Amino acid sequence: MAEWVRIASSWLEPIYEGMLRGLRASGYVQVDETSVKCHDPDIKRGKTQTGWLWVISRPGGDVVFDWRLSRQHDELTSLVEGFAGILQSDGYGAYTTYAAAHPEVSWVGCWAHARRKFFEAQAQNPRVAQWILCLIASMYHQEKQWDEAGIDAAQRRVCRQRDFTRKLYWLRVVVLRVREQVLPKSGLGKACTYLLGQWTPLSAHLRHGETRLDNNLVENAIRPSALGKKNWLFIGHPNAGQRSAIIYSLVVSCQRHGHDPLAYLKDVLTRLPQRRADTDITDLLPANWKPPVEVELDAASQS
């Protein structure tokens, strides 16, 4: 069965590479990473080591997982090589370093991470934490209204600058004052320090209209692997990690585009061996794929 997976991932790799190229050229991506155990019997017999699935995506677009054996900053550099545009992430230092070294990249933060820390601090100081949570929630409420109104990115940018500038000013004033009044290592103190440390990427949403306020979409894309590793515990040999990444990428992307992953994989794994190596595979990307029945109907209607 392991050999079947190896062969299947090898056939699927051109599609995977096409998805990754599309994301790098899209101008706006969300990035995250999650740890996964692996087992290399040649290094640690009977023991596992930590590997990482790095994930790159964009709202409504494909999701690409990439397997790496470390979380070092240069792993991000190779993942998004050639990318120019808006990069959204949490506060991990690799993203800070990358944005500082690449002026063609505009880094925006994740409000969900900042909000989560104040939510967790409610047990210690509910009144103050809830006050700050309400300020953040008011931005999400307006974003929802703009989503329902169907405004475009240019309009949303104007709306954010009009409605969020003053809110962000007062939010920062409140958090600065609260930080002076609580212990630095308390839950509320850590929440304030995190938000203020991330203030530049968090407030950068004012300059853009196409961004989401948080990274929740890419975090949701990671969830199947996070749940899976509780069942299968670890990947076998580290070399098998990228095979898992390829298959995860196609399955999760199919789900995002509303396709049945089993039907998709059955179709493309039937068609790929029949094509020449240099044949364009754009029609097989999850975003463009159509079930065989729909392809036949389209051909019949054009004949």
Image (cartoon, rainbow, N blue to C red):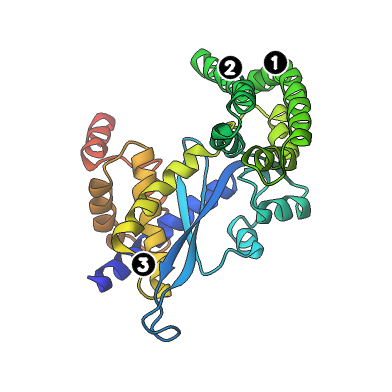
Q: Quadrant of the C terminus?
A: top left
Alpha-carbon span between mark 2 and mark 3:
42 Å
Q: Residues within 10 Å of mark 3 (few under 14, many from 20)?
A: some
Q: Residue at x 56, y 43 (%)?
A: 30
Amino acid type, label 2 = Gln
Residue at x 38% of width, y 65% of height: 243
Q: Which residue is mark 2?
A: 142
Using the image as rendered, state which of residue 190 and residue 147 is in the foreground.
190
Instruction: Confirm or deny contact between disc 2 and disc 1 (CB under 8 A).
Output: yes
Sequence-wise, which precedes: disc 2 or disc 1?
2
Mark 1 falls on what kind of element?
Answer: helix
The amino acid on which the numbered mark 1 sits, given as a three-letter code, is: Asp
Marks 2 and 3: CB-CB under 8 Å? no
Query: Does 199 sit left or right of 36 as displayed?
Result: right
Indicate the quadrant where residue 2 lies.
bottom left
The image position of residue 90, as x and y in percent, is 61, 45
SS for callout 2: helix
- Which of marks 3 and 1 precedes in the sequence? 1
Disc number for residue 163: 1
Return the residue at label 3.
Answer: 234
Percent of width and height locating residue 183? 71, 41
Give whichever of 118, 250 is nearer the camera: 118
Dot 1 surroundings within 10 Å: few (below 14), some, or many (20 or more)?
Answer: few
Nearest the viewer among 56 and 40 is: 40
Image quadrant where residue 195 sits = top right
**Quarter residue 257 falls in:** top left
Q: Position of residue 143 (x, y in %)?
A: 57, 20
